[in-house]
Image (cartoon, grey):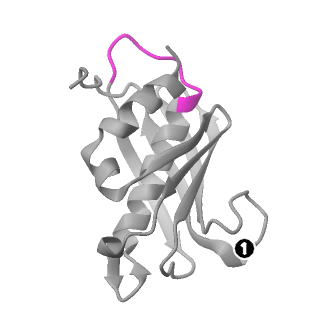
């Protein structure tokens, strides 16, 4: 089992991930891409996506990124150690794409970044006007918790 397999198994079983409708589009080592579909229940006012929903997409994307290239330990556990997020533009009535990249992989900490983009452009560097938020730095411990058994 690979770290990508762990994420493919974990994401659909996470209650918060399911509530937000986040789905994996790519769980490859080197680049992870997750999509959060537009849902009016995730709005803060009118059609503006709530910053907490955007932050959750960023956090889940970087967690998946940290795991995608990781060795899978015998006992799984994990935690976000720190995260710095900058909101660059409002997201209005649109799906959002989280694109994560590993910056540095240590013994137990993985430093990653993530861009949150609109679906028009979901490859890094293809137009900053579609960039909604950016995680500047995030540390994730990659000895994550055990996955639940099949329900």
* Residue 135 in view (yes/no): no
Q: Position of residue 88 (x, y in %)?
A: 57, 78
* In the rendered image, the vertical position of residue 107 relative to residue 91, given as above or below: above
Residue 145: in magenta span: no
Q: Secondary structure at mark 1?
A: helix
Residue 73: in magenta span: yes
Give 87 or 137, whichever is nearer the viewer: 87
Tell me where residue 40 sits by quadrant: bottom left
- 4 horizontally vs 7: left or right: right
Please report the bounds of the magenta region as a residue range: 68-76
The residue under label 1 is: 128
Tell me where residue 32 sits by quadrant: top right
* In the rendered image, the vertical position of residue 34 relative to residue 79, given as above or below: below
Q: Position of residue 108 (x, y in %)?
A: 46, 27
* In the rendered image, the vertical position of residue 19 relative to residue 53, given as above or below: above
Q: Position of residue 81 (x, y in %)?
A: 38, 44
Residue at the top extreme of this rendering: 74
* Residue 108 in view (yes/no): yes
Tell me where residue 20 sits by quadrant: bottom left
Q: Position of residue 151 (x, y in %)?
A: 20, 26
Query: Would you say the magenta stretch is mainly helix, strand or loop?
Result: loop
Residue at the left extreme of this rendering: 151
């Amino acid at each position: 089992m690979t770290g990508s397999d762990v994420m493919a198994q974990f994401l659909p079983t996470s209650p918060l991930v399911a509530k937000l409708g986040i789905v994996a589009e790519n769980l490859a080592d080197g680049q992870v891409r997750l999509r959060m579909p537009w849902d009016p229940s995730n709005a803060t006012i009118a059609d503006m996506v709530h910053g907490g929903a955007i932050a959750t997409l960023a956090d889940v994307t970087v967690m998946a990124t940290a795991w995608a290239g990781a060795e899978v330990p015998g006992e799984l556990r994990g935690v976000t150690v720190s995260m710095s997020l900058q909101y660059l533009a409002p997201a209005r009535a649109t799906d959002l794409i989280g694109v994560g990249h590993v910056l540095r992989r240590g013994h137990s900490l993985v430093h990653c970044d993530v861009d949150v983009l609109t679906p028009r452009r979901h490859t890094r560097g293809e137009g900053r006007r579609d960039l909604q938020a950016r995680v500047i730095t995030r540390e994730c411990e990659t000895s994550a918790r055990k996955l639940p058994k099949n329900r």
